[in-house]
Amino acid sequence: MTEKITAVKGMNDVLPKDSYLWEWLEAQVRDLMHAYAYSNIRTPIVEPTALFVRGLGEVTDIVEKEMYSFEDRLNGEQLTLRPEATAGVVRSVVENNLLYDAPRRLYYMGPMFRHERPQRGRYRQFHQMGAEALGFAGPELDAELILMAHALWQHLGLKDVRLELNSLGQPPERAQHRQALIAYLQDHAQLLDEEAKRRLHTNPLRILDTKNPDLQGLVNAAPRLIDFLGQTSLAHFESLKAILDANGVAYTLNPRLVRGMDYYNLTVFEFVTQSLGSQGTLCGGGRYDYLIEQLGGKPAPAVGWAFGVERVLELIKAQGLAQSVAPLDCFAIVPQAQSFPVVFKAVESLRRLGLKVQMHAPSLGQAKPEEGKLASLDDKTPWQHVGSMKSQFKRADSSGAMYALIFGSDELATGCVTVKSLRDGQGLQRVELLKDIDQWGKALQSSLHPKS
Ligand code: HAM
């Protein structure tokens, strides 16, 4: 046998058993975004490498070691598979002059790529859904975005999701804190690990984010950025907290929350859960008031977040909130292949009414071809082996359909179809005239899907 080709490590297929849940989440998030008047933006997956180096910061884990970068084989251009979407959205907003007349609220969904060590909840191709509000300076938009994410967790019914909040202040405040932090860490240089020593002068703030248990005592006692914030920064933070308080959104202040990219200032936040093991950060974001200018645009403030789709879906499943198959209304049982012309007419008209109908069709397994040989076009009859009623009923049952429509020869001879309930526990049956199938379908549609 020829050797199989398998997927790239850390990059997963979304198979039919899960894809309904993906589509369902996408639909919920789309509705949420529309409720808050965010419009969709779709930017390329491949961007110039310089966008991320300049946008995310040279001394970040992502830029230092996690990007999928390559050279365009024709013109030598340095390109990268996007590790996140904020930089690309900003590039697009600047390039297309989207802020010329008004601020913008935008959202996106799609795959991102980071060369991390794969484990539960951490993949090399993963997906984010995110929202960015560009051109707004006040804390109201920080609040709007946090409330929007909070509303999503509520709507999905997720439990055990906690909001962590911090303010990173403005660049001059950060510079003062940085000096104090470097001095403090230098005083304790003998305690630092290799990573911390390397970051001491390049990105000391990130040392506060260390996972090394030996450094926890040291970083807990380090100078806190929040103590270096001036009045304006503090007022921004206080106003945000007041809106969250008034709306019953609980949060924990985490002075060590610094985030993984350098573009943030003022508000930063993460939604975290204990229910997913070590990869418990569902959603992260914050303000990035200097990124637009840094990427060549006219200075304009902005704020946003993104959540990891795989992690949110895993939490939905772990908490038993998932429905993994698309709800199906009817399953058409076809005991004789000759009936298909009539069956098609009926199921097509039900589908036009908005009902979801699966029709039984012979599959290769039922064609019983000669052993070791696939049924082929020369074989005159494989499609006529529609399978026994019993096997069709089994499929109808496992399809999740509410009703089986039985198009037997007795029924068709009298212009009828038998409708059998599959979910009432008693298998109640009734006979409907085929010529009136539309009427029956309309009544079913309004009882099963009253809103649509
Ligand atoms: P981030 O914190 O790097 O932020 O990513 C956001 C979320 O994406 C994380 O909280 C996590 O759920 C998910 N995620 C990140 N890496 C992986 C991975 N390797 N595997 C699975 N899930 C992952 C950003 O990307 C920012 N662009 C968010 C933002 C938008 N800030 C402002 N606007």
Image (cartoon, rainbow, N blue to C red):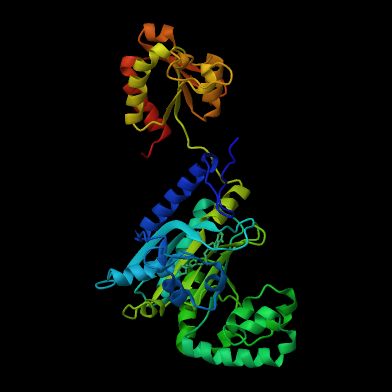
Q: Is residue 77 left or right of residue 249?
A: left
Q: Residue at x 45, y 15 (%)?
A: 379
Q: Is residue 35 left or right of residue 266?
A: left
Q: Would you say residue 122 is visible in this rendering?
A: yes
Q: Would you say residue 427 is visible in this rendering?
A: no
Q: Nearer the viewer, residue 243 or 92?
A: 92
Identify the image quadrant of the N terminus: top right
The quarter of the displayed image where residue 449 is located: top left
Compared with 405, 243 (above or below) is: below
Q: Nearer the viewer, residue 270 or 158?
A: 270
Compared with 350, 129 (above or below) is: below
Q: Is residue 48 left or right of residue 256?
A: left
Compared with 93, 182 (above or below) is: below
Q: Nearer the viewer, residue 376 or 166?
A: 376
Q: Nearer the viewer, residue 368 or 259?
A: 368
Identify the image quadrant of the C terminus: top left
The percent position of residue 95, horizontal first and vertical second, equals: 30, 70
How many discs appear?
0
Compared with 151, 89 (above or below) is: below
